[in-house]
Image (cartoon, grey):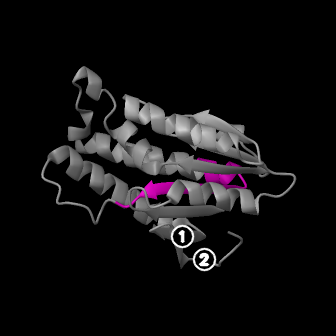
Amino acid sequence: MLTMIIGGVRSGKSGYAERLMMDEVKADEVLHYIATSAPYDEEMKQRVKRHQDDRRHYHHQWKTWEQPRHVEQLAASFTAQDRVLLDCLTNLVSNELFVGWEAGLEPWREPAFRQACYEKIRDGIRQLTHTAGHVVVVSNEIGHETVWDDEATLYYGQLLGALHQTFVAEAERVLQMEYGLPLLRKGAKQNG
């Protein structure tokens, strides 16, 4: 099963996704957290630490996978007894699309590279959904943000938008977060 949770920045997506997973977990299931943030500056390091600390205080144990790229490599680690939270698609797309930026590389300028990124991320998440019992993917909605006036942001938005459309079409459940409130957009309401 695939659940998508999409919303604006700081709309409560991650916290809601974690609570949803804990509310729906069965006694024989294991909770997994795929963290895609690459803590490249002090602010990101603090955000990652805060999320890790939050999960330590839950009554359920989480197995955390720090995986800023190559989520497809984790698929074989899961079984039908596993519930996987991927937080978040937005960071994963950035990490895959802009690989090598710190060395001045710009492979994202090539259409073939962007297509390969789309396929890699799409196929990686599909692999997760085929091995794990339930996958929840959190992502930011950036399509309603400011006008994109540079190539990198334009290509990033196009790739993220294409992945959103793909996964929303494939998901059994889609929730949109607004102001901390989950709005069911597709599927049946369940616990949470």
Please tell me which residue lies in front, 92 or 56.
Answer: 56
Are discs 1 and 2 less than 8 Å apart at CB?
yes
- Residue 107 in the image: x percent, y percent? 25, 33
Q: Is residue 69 visible?
A: no
Q: CA distance from mark 1 to mark 2?
A: 7 Å
**SS state under label 2:** loop
Residue bearing the label numbered 2: 187
Label 2 crowd bin: few (<14), some (14–19), many (20+), radius 10 Å: few
Q: Is residue 90 visible?
A: yes
- Residue 185 in the image: x percent, y percent? 51, 77
Magenta part of the chain: 127-141
| Residue 4 to residue 46: above or below | below
Q: Which mark is residue 174?
A: 1
Q: Could you tell me the amino acid type at mark 2?
A: Gly
The answer to whether 88 appears left or right of 3 in the picture is left
| Residue 124 to residue 163: above or below | above
The answer to whether 70 appears left or right of 151 in the picture is right
Q: Which residue shows up at 59% across the image and 63% down it?
A: 3
User: Residue 135 in magenta?
Assistant: yes
